[in-house]
Image: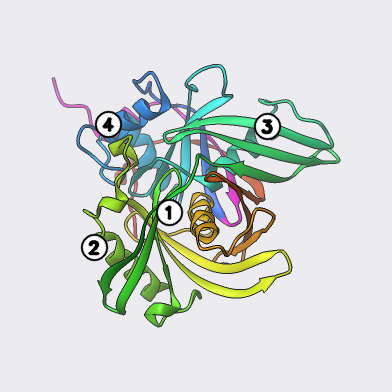
Amino acid sequence: MPAVSAAARVTNTVHTTDYHTAGEPFRIVTGGLPPVPGDTVAERCATAIGPGGSGTAPRRGALDDVRRLLVQEPRGHAGMYGGFLVPPDDDGAHLGVLFWHKDGYSTACGHGTMALGAWAVDSGLVAAPDDGDAQVRIDVPSGRVTATVHRIEGRTSGVTFRNVPARVTARKVPVATGFGLAEVDIAHAGACYATVSARSLGLTVTKEALPQLVRAGQEIRAALATHPGTWHPESPLLSGVYGVILHDALPDTPFGPHQRNVTVFADGQIDRSPCGSGTSARLALLAEDGLLGPGDDLLHESVTGTVFTGRHLGQGVTEVTGTAYRTGEHAFVLDPHDSLGHGFLL
């Protein structure tokens, strides 16, 4: 019997609803997925990645065929991000999700959590008042998170994401880069983030400097591959640097610190938003440094100029507020005669 081609494995129409959160895309896959084995979202994520793999080394199969179909051109692009809807761990959550990007899967995604909260309310999955708030509880690979959806006159006006607890695991780790010696801080906030002052490397967080910022981020991520500060005591799934945050300190606002950052994740991808889970990591570090008090807000800008507002509530609990807007609904198909198959990346 002839082998079934990878293209032929995507036989169903794949339905998605797309959002952007502060400029970063999030493609919610609502239909057309194959079954994903596992009793929990974390187990399903491990299944998607495969034995001995990492978030950037996915196992090829029917599920990953869908990921590649949606992230690669001509249906997607290298900066595309999204999530597969899966059952939650129990009745305490409204839904579960597996986060994915160009190179594989991730254990946390704050901007995606905000988009999912908005989608759950906008689609009617979770009831919400015309004026007031509604909570959407979501099981993600790193735990249970909450999106509080804010409503004004029948529309969603913003979303506040409460993350799993964030914790600092290493400070001032020396890392040699092509731009000089970096002193890197490491924090876990659903995923592991390494953070460094861009100015300490002679860089600034601007669009013009993106090639240099990406290169520095890749060098730092590679250098920390075996550092114990990147390990998570509870799960190998949560270990290893997911993103490198290069940040600039800006003049404080009357409400607290003000920073601009770019988060370089996976294989040199750039978060267009200020990075939701990465903001949680920055909040934990600023609180430990005494630069962010319980009543303070962090005004956190992205390299594109969009903004999240972050708060540290103590004991590692963080909240990040932003906006998420629907950008489209899609029914993607793969013609078995299409010579491009799942597409390509540039």
Q: In the image, what residue occupies the spot 27% across and 40% down?
A: 58
The quarter of the displayed image where residue 305 is located: bottom right
- Residue 247 can be seen, yes or no: yes
Residue placed most toward the observer, 178 or 290: 290
Q: Foreground: 260 or 346?
A: 260
Query: Given the image, on which type of amino acid does mark 1 rest?
Result: His
State how far apart marks 4 and 3 are (Cα): 34 Å
Kind of element beneath mark 4 = loop
Labelled pair 2, 3 in contact (Cβ < 8 Å): no
Q: How crowded is mark 1: few (under 14 residues within 10 Å), some or many (20 or more)?
A: some
Whichever of labels 4 and 2 marks the residue nearer the N terminus, that label is: 4
Q: Are marks 2 and 1 in contact (CB under 8 Å)?
A: no
**What residue is pinned by disc 3?**
135
Q: Position of residue 191 (x, y in %)?
A: 40, 46
Q: Tag 4: residue type?
A: Gly
Kindly identify the amino acid type of the residue bearing the numbered disc 3: Gln
Which residues lie in the magenta part?
1-23
Q: How far apart are marks 2 and 3 (CA)?
A: 40 Å
Find out whether residue 344 is within the magenta segment. no
Badge 3 marks a residue whose secondary structure is strand
Q: How many labels does the image show?
A: 4
Helix, strand or loop at label 2? It is helix
Q: Is mark 1 on a helix, strand or loop?
A: loop
Q: Mark 2 points at which residue?
A: 223
Per the rendering, the mark at residue 77 is 1
